[in-house]
Amino acid sequence: MTAASILKIAVTSEGPTLADPVDPRFGRAGGFVVVDLASMATTYVDNGSSQVLAQGAGIQAAENLVKAGAQALLTGHVGPKAWAALQAAEVKVVQGVEAMTVGEAVAKFKAGEFAFSDAPSR
Amino acid sequence: MIIAIASGKGGTGKTTVSASLVSSWKRPVLAVDMDVEEPNLHLFLKPESVSSEAAYLEVPVLDKTLCKQCGACAELCQFKALSLMGAHLLVFPDLCHGCGGCMRICPEGALQKGQRELGAVETGVTPGGIPCLTGRLRIGEAMSPPLMGKLRQRMHAQAAKESLDIIIDAPPGVSCPAMTAVQDADVVVLVTEPTPFGLHDLRLAWKAFRPLGKPMGVVINRAGLGDDRVHAFCREKGLPLLAEIPFRRDIAEHYAKGGILAQLDPGLRATFEDLAERLERMGAEVNHA
Amino acid sequence: MRELVVISGKGGTGKTSLTAAFAHLADNIVLCDLDVDAPDLHLIAQPAVQRSGPFMSGHGAEIDPAACSGCGTCMDVCAFGAIHNEGGRFTVETAHCEGCKVCVALCPEKAIDFPDRLCGTWYESDTRFGPMVHALLDPGQENSGKLVTLLKAKARERASALGLDLILSDGAPGIGCPVISSLSQASLVLLVTEPTPSGLHDLERVAELCRTFRIPSTVLINKADLSPEYQAAIHAFCQAREIPVVGHLPHDPAITEAMVRGQAVTEGPDTLFGVQVRQIWSKLQSLLEAPSPSRSKESRS
């Protein structure tokens, strides 16, 4: 599967810009940087509404991501419930994205260096 | 009459005291183990003919043919057990708290009653003829209170039908599960040990249970170990000291064999008979008030 | 970053006392008390609080008496028995309110508020053993594991900021939500047990929990000399489940004597017991340094 049909991706992030480090968590991440791949314009989606939940943070995060219009997600790892939610919304997921900046992650994605996951990693 | 044996700190001797109290109780009694995460009372009372019945929580099941994806259920659910993702309404039954709100609010009747297994309620009778009820949480089930609710229903039904007093072995702590366990009690017994951890957690328990307005008393286990600050605390707060069980190696070894302390020697038998009498009097005062 | 989480299933086996001793023996750690229901580690660590804050979780329903028409719909729909009718006045008993919002949604007068709920307080402190993160849940609150998760995140942030690479976490008894949350991202779990029927029974349940979440674990038998029979039974169980036993400790008043002095058992005068604890800590350090087993592709059941 190539990146060709995807217009907007979300990267879990510790901050609002491309220079910020990737946050490996999904449900409890502080937010996502949503990138329009054509223009490289970015918006930041605050994920606080997920962090406040005792349980189901990943599901809320999935809802936040879909509302922001992202078609793919780059993150460290996704749990089974969040996975089910993302699958239902037909969002493609790349896991194992960590120890780099959001900008670096987006560049690697555009260069075709990532493979989409076929299962949640934990 | 209902007596709950609780504590702030784990491992102070709730089950030890419950088992001995049950075996010393003069009136017909039902022994209930409400520590559903780690039920241990049966290891000492050793009930026989144990039958186990699975307990379930009512959770929603979706009939996709009726769902119009309006999202009202997902909007209402505080626990993310329902989520509208694109054209799909997803149900996550293990996040459900069983409030039934989604089923009430669905305009299409698309959510029906399904179930999630909470664990089991076990019933048995000791060789001496004492009925026992145990709650056992399924491993991986995160919530205790729903199973405790089922256990409480069975407990009240059986006690009413057979005219039994109830002795409840409660879970440790002062959060939701512990409060759930003591809510029906006429008298709450706080078991502690005379150490800094014991004192700290006794104070937490006293603060937590006091607003319930139930008569409380303290049993000091492993007396002689540690210091006397627990005694001072009880005096300061006007908490009756109902019994003291000494810290003795042979007692610890008897416990380690699954033995009931009240059966170890005449001194301990007398200690628990006195405790039973005092609690019966405290309970009777509540019922006549 | 490594995290050692100390749990037991059964209460009173010595988790907190031993965690304090390891904290004393270790260098460069962040100490974390995850038993938010009945925390005791601070009684030995004696933390100086640097920062604290409210722990908010969920919501509670509150009926506005001015707007209430007395229809009783709220009481009919409440699945938790939290609403009472006191002579026509309907009120919510906060202790039983699950925060499900059903009454709020179905009240015909929209007379029910749904404010955020204050459930406890978290603390970031300094101790003679290193920085410490701890909390206290208010009585009767749901112990969902969210506060545990918050503390673990704070411990990690603190460790990162200070360049420390080991978190020592004292866990809660049981197998419920707070224990499940304690296990998240743990490098190694130490299961502290005692050779008694309850000790073995509860160890079996908590070991199963660790197995389900695929966390490497090791067992310590405390008060080991109480029962050779149960000691053997615990060994047999560990062997069958392939869980290594890191060691044994005898039933020794030294732990309580140290606790009364406000010290870890390895502080103060040398005891044989203290020497044995040091040996166990040494073994735990080796286990923590070992590379963690890969568990990437398998999904959790």
Image (spheres, coloured by chain):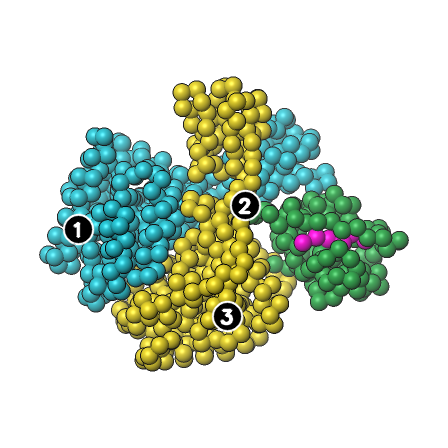
Any idea which chain is the green one in this picture? A
Q: Which residue is mark 3?
A: C130
Q: Chain of mark 3?
A: C
Distance from the alpha carbon under mark 3 to that under mark 2: 29 Å
Distance from the alpha carbon under mark 1 to that under mark 2: 42 Å
Seen in the image, is B45 located left or right of residue A71? left
Q: Which residue is mark 1?
A: B272
Name the residue rendered at 20%, 57% in the picture.
B245
Name the residue rendered at 84%, 60% in the picture.
A110
Name the residue rendered at 26%, 50% in the picture.
B236
**Element type at marker 3?**
strand
Residues at circles 3 and 2 in contact by the CB criterion of under 8 Å: no
Residues at circles 1 and 3 in contact by the CB criterion of under 8 Å: no
For the residue marked with disc 2, what is the amino acid? Ser
Q: Main secondary structure of the magenta part?
A: strand
For the residue marked with disc 3, what is the amino acid? Gly
Seen in the image, is A59 located left or right of residue C44? right
Name the residue rendered at 57%, 48% in the picture.
A55
Hue of chain C?
Answer: yellow
In the image, which residues are magenta?
A30-35
For the residue marked with disc 1, what is the amino acid? Phe
- Graded by Cα atoms within 10 Å as few (under 14), some (14 to 19) or many (20 or more), the crowding at tag 3 reads some
Q: Which residue is mark 2?
A: C57
**Element type at marker 2?**
strand
Q: Quadrant of residue B103?
A: top right
Hue of chain B?
Answer: cyan
Distance from the alpha carbon under mark 1 to that under mark 3: 45 Å
